[in-house]
Image (cartoon, coloured by chain):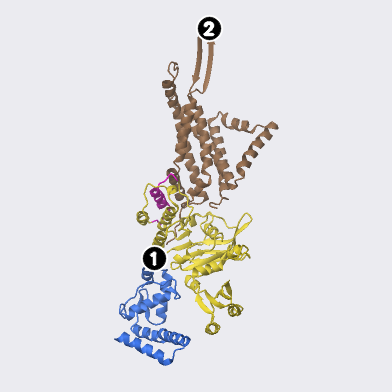
Amino acid sequence: MSLIEVQTSEIVKRQIGYKWRAYTGVFTSLVVIQLLGLLFSLNGTGQMGSGRTGYDVKITYFTADIIVGFTIFWGFLTAFLLTTKAYREDDFAFVTNRKTSTLSTIAFLFMICVIGALTALLSSFALKLLAYVILPGEEMLLIQGMGDVGTWLQGIFATILIVFMFSSLGYLAGMIIQLNKMLVIVLPVVVVGLMILLSRGGFQVEEYFFQFIFEENQAWLFTLKTIAVTTIFYALAVLVSNRLEVKR
Amino acid sequence: MILDTDGLKPIYIQIAEWLESEILHGNFQADEKVYSQYKLADLYNINPATAAKGLTKLAEEGVLYDKRGLGKFVSTNAKAIIVEKRKNQTLKKLVEDLVTEAGRLELSEEHILKLVRDAWKGEQG
Amino acid sequence: MKAIKCKDVNKQFYRKRALNDLSFSVDENKIVGVIGRNGAGKTTLLKILAGLLKEKSGVIEVFGRRPFNNLFVSANTIYIDDAMNFPTALTLKEILEEARRFYHHWDHELALRLFHFFEFEPKQRHNELSKGKESTFNMIVGLASRSPLTIFDEPTTGMDAAVRKDFYRALLKDYLAHPRTILLSTHHLEEMEDLLEEVLVIHEGALSLHISMDELKEYGVGLTGKKDAVDSFLKEKEMLWKKEQTFDTCYAVIKNDLTGDDYQRLKESGVQVSPVKANDLCIYLTESQNGKGSVDDVFDRSADV
């Protein structure tokens, strides 16, 4: 049999296609989690009321906030799960090495994050429609349509970046835990412990992090920051994965 | 032929002996190509290297000869070589065993010769 | 060209030593059996060769390159064991389709023909198969991939005798048509010994023997006779194994380097000489030498029957 030289890019491409077909479970979980989010959202994501003699005003907001939140969580969890042994062995059933495996997984995660973010935002329309149908007797004061297309696109873009960023966090956490099963316990303890310690010293890591990302008003700075964080997390994950053996 | 995989005799020798018998029976004529190691391997479900060993053994004994790139062919004097070999080795060994066994059973030389003569008559008649 | 080269390869799992200074090489396009007891290190070795595990020290080359984390080695190697993990979302037919995309030499025709011969349903899923069926399916993937290095680690687990026979036949047929390097680890040496060209006998992580199958079959001879007669012989020969028998006799296996003179002496002292089957020889060679003896000794202390 003649020996075959293969290109990394060729195998990555094959692996992406393979994962797209093989990991259909992630789409099922996306649907489930977004439906769940939709259900919770029916209660309204924000309320405001005021009353005066003679009349009451109660305003209920229906937004996709909860669904987006759930989707972010899904992104984290899915990435985390893809690092587990069962998925990793699926990965190595055919031609691959650590590099092509990780690169294709990251590409796959990006693709599903785009889908997750899109469906999350689109579901806000579904939510409003549903609220209108299910909750009769209440006056729908405002149904925001597409609104300003630019704003809407910006929203999608930002959501994609955030979901993808959280997937990188999940992927890194998963990879670290794969190094040694003990880390399932050690890692959260260390992370939470550090956060508590630092907050005692007057430094709130999580607050700082959320400020750093979410309170960024400049769109381009926000983009830069999320991409930078995502890249760092994925790069660390690649470093860790290169030390991993596949089958024990 | 069915290979005796449990027996004393190595597989490659069994292959060589089978080819010898086929040559004696005239199934492979002089200057005719014999089966390749791959054909033999397929036929007897064995590794081709084992089959090749059997072919090489026959080539060393002069029963077969090599044509470069074409395979192994039956020598013109193959039959004579095989007969001579079997006479000197196989038959001699059988007779030795016969004598040894006769010794164990304390039979006389006459007795053995008679047995041989009877068997010979039976075979001819 | 050498398909595999190993020099002083070591591997450790935590404290336990799995491979111990293993050195050998395998020529291209041979079928080689990897023989050893459970836990001898066969699987560890095969996984290192496939690039799935990382050696601790030593030099390993598969087609001239170090296998761990190597895309070239992965593209030219397939590793099939009895714990293959295929995505549960894919049907058997889809798994074959995926494999086809990854392996350049993949023969889809052959895969489908074997698939139908062994009566698989296209819509079945891998995790729903019985053990024997699972092994059979994995074997199909291994054969159809036509990888220049094909590794089967205990491929026949759970297969019934008829399927095993079909498998050996299919393996040989395809090998004859498309020679490639095939490594097979097995507990059924007696069933597939005629297929193998060479054997690697591995014992407690170290190489105990690497010879051709034909040589292995003649490697040892068994001596049966009176204890003192056999013992006097054992003094000058390399003993591989020995077992006491009834009536003050014993059976011993020695390395087969007997001369015509030896045969004469054995005959005179009434010691019978018998061949030793390859499978038995491997068992003798890999018997644990930790002083525990045979399983008989476990029962010795309980009442003699």
Chain coloured blue in this rendering: B
Report the Cα–Cα distance between label 2 and label 1: 96 Å
Residue C300 sits in quarter: bottom right
B125 sits to left or right of A113: left
Callouts 2 and 1 close, C-beta under 8 Å: no
Secondary structure under tag 1 reads helix
Question: x, y (%) of residue A191?
Answer: 63, 38
Chain C palette colour: yellow
- Asked if residue C39 is positioned above or below residue A98 in the image, the reply reads below
Chain coloured brown in this rendering: A
Residue in the image at 50% along x and 22% along y: A44
C11 sits to left or right of A156: right
Q: Quadrant where the C terminus of chain C lies?
A: bottom right
Query: Looking at the image, which is closer to me, C105 or B56?
Result: B56
Identify the magenta region: C88-106
Work out which residue is located at the far right of the displayed protein and give it: A201
Query: Looking at the image, which is closer to me, A216 or C270?
Result: C270
Disc 2: CA contacts within 10 A as few (<14), some (14-19) or many (>=20): few
Q: Which disc is residue A53 wearing? A: 2
